[in-house]
Amino acid sequence: MRWQAPRGMHDILPPEVARWQAVEGRIRDLARRYGYQEIRTPVVEHTEVFQRGIGEGTDIVEKEMYTFTDRGGRSLSLRPEGTAAVMRAYLERGMSGWPQPVKLYYIAPIFRYDRPQKGRYRQHHQFGAEVIGSPHPAADAEVLSLPIRLMQDLGLTHVEVHLNSVGDPQCRPAYIAALREYFGRHLSDLCEDCRRRYDINPLRILDCKVDGCRRVAREAPPIFPYLCDACRAHFEGVQRHFSWLGIPYAVDASIVRGLD
């Protein structure tokens, strides 16, 4: 038998470890400067954590998670991202009783059942930051600015952030109805996955990478006219903070990745 790592996984050998440690050190220094504390959550969580946190209709949950049943009959999954696990820990460990907001960061392996290709694996290493307990747009702007500051610290330039808003539970339904009305006229042009998304969550059609779906999505109505006053003010506040921070950004109505 030829011994080798599972497809899409990789080893980090001693000559490479020093470079990883250098980058991780920069991350920790940056996070501490901004007042973030490190959190380490289990590699394995109950599958429901991700179904509820990411969304049952998402590609991550339906196609990309490593899920198995343990000997006790419980459905468990390797974490495909960090936010849902951090929120589970925040709630379970009583962090809502800490002084708010709680600012956490993590450097952790995550697992996605993607098609392996050059520079893309099934085991990834993710730096993430969360500010929990603050409704202020400055908190969102700060979290979004951290990876930009990290790239600047590492000598990377010409980085631009793309921003969008998906509203809140009060104003989002009106936008979803508008998307459903629009995409309903183009169902025959959508891929099989997007025809299914049309019923579950048409927002996800905006994120499809199939050429035909992308052409249709380019003409879809943007969310901005549907935002309530509070969401519009919040989104404009995030943009103002980016301008104050001197970080280049572009408003992009097609950005819908993340939590459903």
Image (tube, helix red, strand yellow):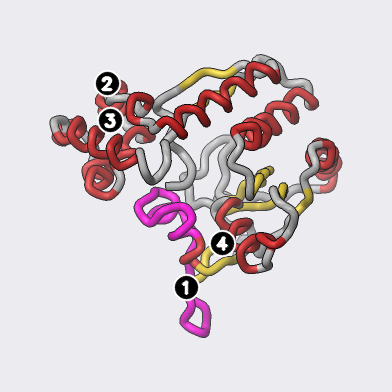
Q: Can residue 105 be seen at all in this image of the molecule?
A: no
Q: Residues within 10 Å of mark 2 (few under 14, many from 20)?
A: few
Name which of mark 2 and mark 1 comes first in the sequence.
1
Q: Residue at x 21, y 37 (%)?
A: 180
**Marks 1 and 3: CB-CB under 8 Å?**
no
Q: Can residue 219 be seen at all in this image of the molecule?
A: yes
Name which of mark 4 and mark 2 comes first in the sequence.
4
Name which of mark 3 and mark 2 comes first in the sequence.
3
- Is 143 left or right of 212, judged from the image as shown? right
Assign a secondary structure to mark 4: strand
In which quadrant of the rendered view does residue 159 lie?
top right
Callout 4 amino acid:
Leu
Residue 252 position, x and y percent, is 45, 23
Q: Residue at x 74, y 27 (%)?
A: 149
Gap between marks 1 and 3 measured at Cα: 33 Å
Q: Residues within 10 Å of mark 1 (few under 14, many from 20)?
A: some
Assign a secondary structure to mark 3: helix
Which residue is identified by label 3?
Answer: 213
Q: Residue at x 67, y 66 (%)?
A: 94
Q: Nearer the viewer, residue 220 or 156?
A: 220
Which residue is identified by label 1?
Answer: 75
Callout 1 amino acid:
Ser
Q: Is residue 66 magenta?
A: yes
Which labelled disc corresponds to residue 219? Answer: 2
